[in-house]
Amino acid sequence: MGFFSKDIKTLDDLFVHTLRDIYYAEKQIEKALPKMIDKASDPTLKAGFEKHLKETEGHIARLEEVFEMHGVRAKAVNCPAIDGILEEADEVSSDIDDKQVLDAALIASAQAVEHYEMTRYGTLMAWAKQLGRSDCASILAKNLKEEEATDRKLTEMAESRVNRQAA
């Protein structure tokens, strides 16, 4: 089913489809993070990725809770956007030999992922509220808050030392 599929007729259909999209994305991120942990040389970056892997597991559990609350089966739909972001991250990081430059690239890739997630969670929260599902919106808000915090930490890490070391 494409994003604007014929099967999507209502805002509720769109909400469920997008919920399944971010569910797929979180599961793909969960698979990609161990590779990023292995490639990172900066100890703080490595620890940050490890922490985010645990948070991602929590994001998946929260999404499953939202599916249940909304009365639909937790199911993933392919998300070409996250596949492309993760594929690009893998390609770029496999081409870099300098460990400090690689750490800078890993941060940039991770932030691309975070920004995608933040847009999805923000949209889902707005739609949940519109659908009268503030209960779902409050759970989605927890994921959004963690994604925003991760993005801020990555920016701080990049600006305070990783980019400088890569230069």
Image (spheres, rainbow, N blue to C red):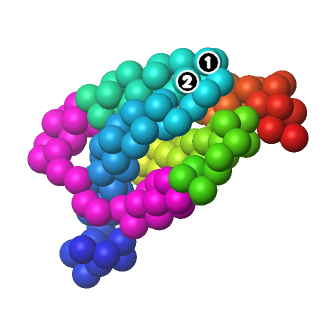
Vertical position of residue 121 compared to residue 141: above or below: below
Of 1 and 44, the residue lying toward us: 44
Residue, x 67% and y 31% (percent of image)?
154
* Residue situated furthest bottom in the rendering: 6
Q: How far, Cα to Cα, is label 2 from label 1?
A: 5 Å
Label 2 belongs to which residue? 46
Q: What x and y, as percent, mark residue 88? A: 53, 60
Tell which of 1 and 40 is nearer to you: 40
Q: Is the magenta stretch mostly helix, strand or loop?
A: helix
Residue 61 has which mark?
A: none
User: Residue drawn 34% across and 25% down?
Assistant: 58
Please tell me which residue is depicted at 80% across the width and 38% down the height of the picture: 166
Identify whether 134 is placed above or below 2.
above
Comparing 75 with 158, the one in front is 158
Labels 2 & 1 near each other (Cβ < 8 A): yes
Secondary structure beneath disc 1?
helix
Amino acid marked by disc 1: Pro
Which of the 4 image quadrants contains residue 55?
Answer: top left
Name which quarter of the figure residue 42 lies in: top right
Q: In this view, does 52 lie to the left or right of 43?
A: left
Element type at marker 2? helix
> What is the three-letter code of the residue carrying label 2?
Lys
**Callout count:** 2
Using the rendered image of the protein, determine whether residue 21 is visible from the camera's viewpoint: yes
Q: In the displayed structure, does residue 12 sit left or right of residue 70? A: right
Q: Find the magenta span and give its range.
A: 63-91
Rendering coords of residue 24 (x, y %): 30, 51
Graded by Cα atoms within 10 Å as few (under 14), some (14 to 19) or many (20 or more), the crowding at tag 1 reads few
- Residue 135 seen in the current view: no
> How far across and down, in percent of the image, does residue 151 sit?
64, 34
State the residue position of label 1: 43
